[in-house]
Image (cartoon, grey):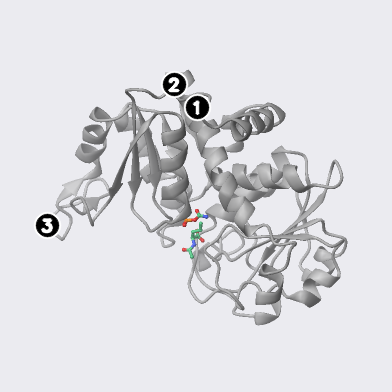
Amino acid sequence: MKQFFYAKDIGDIKAALEEARQVKANRLAWRGLGEGKTIMLVFFNSSLRTRLSSQKAALNLGLSPIVLNIGQDSWKLETELGVVMDGDKSEHLREAIPVMGCYCDLIGVRSFAGLTDREADYAESVLQQFVQYSGRPVISLESATVHPCQAFADLITIDEHKRKPRPKVVLTWAPHPRALPQAVPNSFAEWMIAAGMDLVITQPEGYELDPRFTSGARIEYDQMKALEGADFVYAKNWSCPGVTNPEQYGQILSHDRSWTVDEAHMAVTDNAFFMHCLPVRRNVIVSDAVIDAPTSLVIPEAANREIAAQVVMKRMLESL
Ligand code: AN0
Ligand code: CP
């Protein structure tokens, strides 16, 4: 495996889930695989789960992690080509990436969407520079439009908790005070569809996700109707994807708190499990009662981030 960005990169989903079960049952069985090898984990943005689970997954494989926080531990990096670098950025990605590539065997990159230039974000311009200039297999640790490590962990979690072969999974938009990327819902939708789940997406008008990630899902603008009979409720905020109106890309179109997932929402489901990738704002995205209920899977999802990351790194090491 040379890149991990999209659901197709993992190949057969059933095989990937089986491998995840094996890894989870015996995390240290491949300790020799990463011996003498290094993974560089590059963070342009904050992280709790991704940085810790990636380091833990690497350590399980005997792979040494090096973590670099751009702009804090390193120079501030320019990411756009062709600019006159007389501002606060001391170094360009064009040099920094091949230098990083010299010191590692695998690279993981967290680089959020800028949310101003839709075309640049959806072209994954930063991630593609890592592919082009590092000479190493690259993992998206949430890039502009995708968060595959999260989606894979979410799929593992659903697979572990499902009570029927094809559960109804509802991805619901929820309010948030800041404009957030579309990476998490994009990848969640893409992976649920790839895994053959019955996926319903519900959001206020204008928040339609890019069809390249959602085609095959049912769209329902009435949140309560969407939630009826759900087996899993996956809440997430995202900013305007700019599909229907490109000028609104990255904007907040609604602060409607009636979309906050509370007990009244969960009451119309089929005793659904609640899911969120975290970090979550309590009583904005989800009520205390719902996230604290025994049906909340937020911690098991986070725990499965280690497993998902380990399967991905294992496959990359096997194909070096
Ligand atoms: C980020 C997002 O929505 O993409 C990271 C989620 C894993 N969330 C925030 O910035 C709050
Ligand atoms: N879910 C997730 O990716 O969390 P972090 O942003 O803390 O890594």
Q: Amino acid at mark 2?
A: Leu
Q: Amino acid at mark 1?
A: Lys
- Residue at 43% over, 21% down: 32
- Residue at 43% over, 45% down: 124
Can you give x and y, in whole percent of width and height, for residue 214 in the image? 68, 49
Nearer the observer, 263 or 74: 263
How far separated are the C-alphas under marks 3 and 2?
Answer: 44 Å
Mark 1 or mark 2: whose residue is earlier in sequence: 2
Classify residue 131 as left or right of residue 177: left
Where the C terminus falls, by quadrant?
Answer: top left
Classify residue 204 as left or right of residue 139: right
Spot the residue most to the left. Answer: 86
How far separated are the C-alphas under marks 1 and 2?
Answer: 8 Å
Q: Which mark is residue 314?
A: 1
Can you give x and y, in whole percent of width and height, for residue 158 in the image? 72, 47
Q: Which mark is residue 86?
A: 3
Q: Which mark is residue 33?
A: 2
Image quadrant where residue 241 sits = bottom right
Q: Amino acid at mark 3?
A: Asp
- Residue at 45% over, 45% down: 141
Compared with 194, 70 (above or below) is: below
Mark 3 or mark 2: whose residue is earlier in sequence: 2
